[in-house]
Image (cartoon, grey):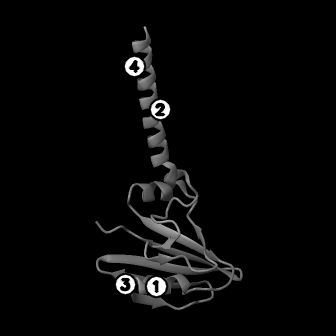
Amino acid sequence: MKRPLVVFAAAVLLVLAGAAAWWQGGARWRSALYCFEEPGQVWGLAPLPAGATPACPESRTVRAEVRAGQTRIEQYLFADWQPETVLKRLERGGFARLTTRPDDGIQFEAVLTRGRERVLYIAEHRGAGTLVHVGGTPVR
């Protein structure tokens, strides 16, 4: 009588462990910082700059595109105007500026390239602060 009970308990524990692993594997996509492949890093190249608060778009569509590997995006908030702080870290990581549009009072833009990878860099004014968007299509 004890043997079937032990087998049943082992099966239940196995199912629960599998469900927990599946749930934990999807935790990144439920997180507010779902878009960062490496939390605490700028594009996986360098540590976050001082004063940068990482963020991801709240859009369900963007979340689905990132999860599907169709797009890659990271965002950073700064309390003051710092249009090139993150850009300099990307350049030190091997990116080069392909084009630059200077600050027009609304935003600063640059297109960066590294090998076959292209990234759109936008630093937009948010009052006295800055919202930096770094985005691109993953290279396969």
Q: Residue at x 49, y 46 (%)?
A: 24
Which numbered disc, 4 or 3, marks the residue that appears first in the sequence?
4
Q: Secondary structure at mark 1?
A: strand
Residue under numbered circle 4: 7
The residue mark sitting in front, 4 or 2, is 4
Q: Please provide percent x and percent y for residue 106.
A: 61, 84
Task: Check residue 16 in the rendering and tell me which mark sits there, or answer none.
Answer: 2
Residue under numbered circle 1: 110
Residue under numbered circle 3: 94
Q: Quadrant of the N terminus?
A: top left
Find the residue positioned furthest to the right.
127
Three-letter amino acid code at the position of disc 1: Ala
Q: Secondary structure at mark 4?
A: helix
Callout 2 crowding tier (Cα within 10 Å): few <14, some 14–19, many ≥20: few
- Image check: 136 left or right of 78? left
Which numbered disc, 4 or 2, marks the residue that appears first in the sequence?
4
Three-letter amino acid code at the position of disc 3: Gly
In the rendered image, which quarter is residue 75 located in? bottom right
CA–CA distance between discs 4 and 1?
61 Å
Which numbered disc, 1 or 2, marks the residue that appears first in the sequence?
2
CA–CA distance between discs 4 and 2?
14 Å
Q: Residue at x 29, y 80 (%)?
A: 115
Three-letter amino acid code at the position of disc 4: Val
